[in-house]
Image: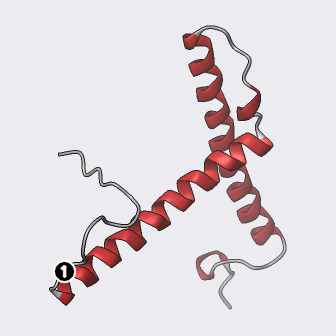
């Protein structure tokens, strides 16, 4: 219903059908890639944005602090992208549609 799967090695014997076994390995690899990206972003939040040091006492306050931290993370990423585009434009690595035609 919610496309939630358990991660980790499957219990019991591996399936006899090789195509089914190959499909299971593909799904496990895909899940691991998604999980690594998500866990990496949480680790970055703990290291750089202070998610590990939340001292709020109330549940609502803690949730607000966490939401604000993720908002700041998203805004900083967008700012980085905009700055990158601006610097590329400024120093001559312009896309073809921005170059003056001769």
From the top left corner, tell me how far across and down residue 47 is, in percent.
78, 44
Residue under label 1: 20
- Kindly tell me whether residue 76 is visible in this rendering: no
Which residue is depicted at the point 71% across and 64% down?
85
Residue 26 visible at all? yes
The residue that appears at 46% across and 65% down in the rendered structure is 32
Q: Is residue 82 above or below residue 92?
A: above
Residue 97 in which image quadrant: bottom right
Looking at the image, which residue sits at the far front? 12
Residue placed most toward the observer, 7 or 59: 7
As displayed, is residue 8 above or below residue 95? above
Task: Describe residue 19's horizontal placement relative to residue 5 as left or right.
Answer: left
Image quarter (top left, top right, bottom left or bottom right) of the C terminus:
bottom right
Q: Residues within 10 Å of mark 1 (few under 14, many from 20)?
A: few
Who is closer to the viewer here, 94 or 51?
A: 51
Instruction: Farthest residue to the top: give it.
Output: 58
Q: Up-down: is 55 above or below 99? A: above
Q: Is residue 70 left or right of residue 10?
A: right
Q: From the top left corner, tell me how far across and down residue 6 is, in percent.
A: 33, 54
The image shows a total of numbered marks equal to 1
Q: Secondary structure at mark 1?
A: helix
């Amino acid at each position: 219903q919610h496309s939630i799967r358990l991660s980790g090695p499957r219990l019991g014997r591996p399936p006899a059908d090789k195509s089914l076994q190959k499909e299971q390995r593909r799904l496990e690899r895909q899940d691991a890639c998604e999980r690594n990206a998500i866990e990496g972003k949480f680790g970055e939040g703990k290291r750089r944005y202070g998610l590990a040091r939340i001292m709020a006492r109330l549940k609502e306050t803690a949730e607000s602090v966490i939401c604000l931290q993720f908002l700041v993370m998203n805004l900083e990423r967008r700012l980085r992208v905009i700055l990158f585009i601006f610097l590329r434009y400024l120093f001559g690595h312009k896309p073809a549609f921005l170059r003056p035609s001769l």
